[in-house]
Amino acid sequence: MNAMAIFTYALNGPMPEACLRSILTIGNFDGVHLGHQALLSETNCLMRALDGSAVAVTFDPHPSRLLRPDLVGQPLTTIADRCTLLTQQGADHVLILQTSPALLQLSPREFFERIIIDQLQARALVEGANFGFGRNREGTVEVLQSLCAEKNLPLSLVPPREVAGQAVSSSRVRADLLAGNVDVVAQLLGRPYRLAGVVGTGQKRGATLGFPTANLHEIATLIPGNGVYAVRAHFDGKTWPAAANVGPNPTFGENARKVEVHLIGFSGQLYDQSLAVDFVKKIRDTKPFGSAQELAAQIQRDVDDVRRILNVSPLAT
């Protein structure tokens, strides 16, 4: 077995040797949610049965960024995080197909025969029931079944995973995130949703209220809906209980949408440092207060709620 690796492939370029003659699962895998994890689990089962490697094939950028750029929102994961999550879920290698107009114009048969059969020499395929491929996603699962039958390529179709009676999907994750249902999102992902960024300079009002906040900038992924959340902040190898405010600051007449994080019990300098935040539960909606004093009192109640939700000692301030 080769060491785990991440490869990038451009159409008409050489295919990495480590990805050849493998068991493949192909998709965007944005979020690497429970449904995606089920595909990786099945891929691993076939890998052991066929004595090959498990390869997750994904796309960067997302095809929709080329096809419908005006309709595309922020992703759930960066490509780097997606690759990390895929390998954590059992992929021996991740192959990133560089999305190009030429790639997107391949018919389903061309994509299948040229990339899956001729170049990757796949030993088996694992896909979900709603898999689509080729130009305009004309390649349905039925088309894939027919193509696989022609080439005697084993195909395993994995039924969707369900949470609360509904199928898990990236679009469902996005909808729940924007609604602030981060506790539900954690069930869909099998882990808390994480935002990462760099701490920038804010108005420093939190410090004047007794609750200094880290203003998270350079966020590349989808931000949950406005509100105050119980979160866990990760910085410099340590984890801190924290309260995060997502949205504007109506008390001070600010309309800009921000992510401000108060790390409970932390004292020190965070400017220009990388900070990751795991969302656990929404505490309340964002709302204006009549004075700074009223806001400070509410923040104290928020901090108390965070301590309770995260089982933090009340001695931490």
Image (spheres, rainbow, N blue to C red):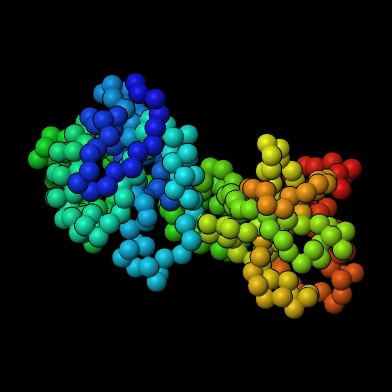
Task: Choose top left, top right, bottom left or bottom right for residue 32.
Answer: top left
Residue placed most toward the observer, 173 or 196? 196
Q: Position of residue 130 (x, y in %)?
A: 31, 52
What is the tally of numbered marks visible in this picture?
0
The structure residue drawn at horizontal position 23% and vertical position 39%, both measured from the top left corner, is 14
Question: Image check: 62 left or right of 166?
Answer: left
Q: Position of residue 203 (x, y in %)?
A: 77, 67
Q: Position of residue 266 (x, y in %)?
A: 81, 46
The structure residue drawn at horizontal position 15% and vertical position 44%, both measured from the top left corner, is 114
Residue 230: tell me if it is visible.
no
Quarter of the image that includes the N terminus:
top left
Task: Choose top left, top right, bottom left or bottom right for residue 52.
Answer: top left
Q: Is 17 drawn above or below residue 256 in the view shown?
A: above
Q: Residue furthest front?
A: 272
Q: Is 154 drawn above or below residue 30 in the view shown?
A: above
Q: Residue furthest left?
A: 150
Task: Choose top left, top right, bottom left or bottom right for residue 57.
Answer: top left
Question: Image check: 235 left or right of 18?
Answer: right
Residue 96: tell me if it is visible.
yes
The structure residue drawn at horizontal position 63% and vertical position 59%, both measured from the top left corner, is 217
Q: Is 280 drawn above or below residue 171 in the view shown?
A: above
The structure residue drawn at horizontal position 81% and vertical position 54%, both measured from the top left corner, is 303
Question: Image check: 20 left or right of 95?
Answer: left
Residue placed most toward the observer, 258 or 294? 258
Q: Position of residue 241 (x, y in %)?
A: 75, 46
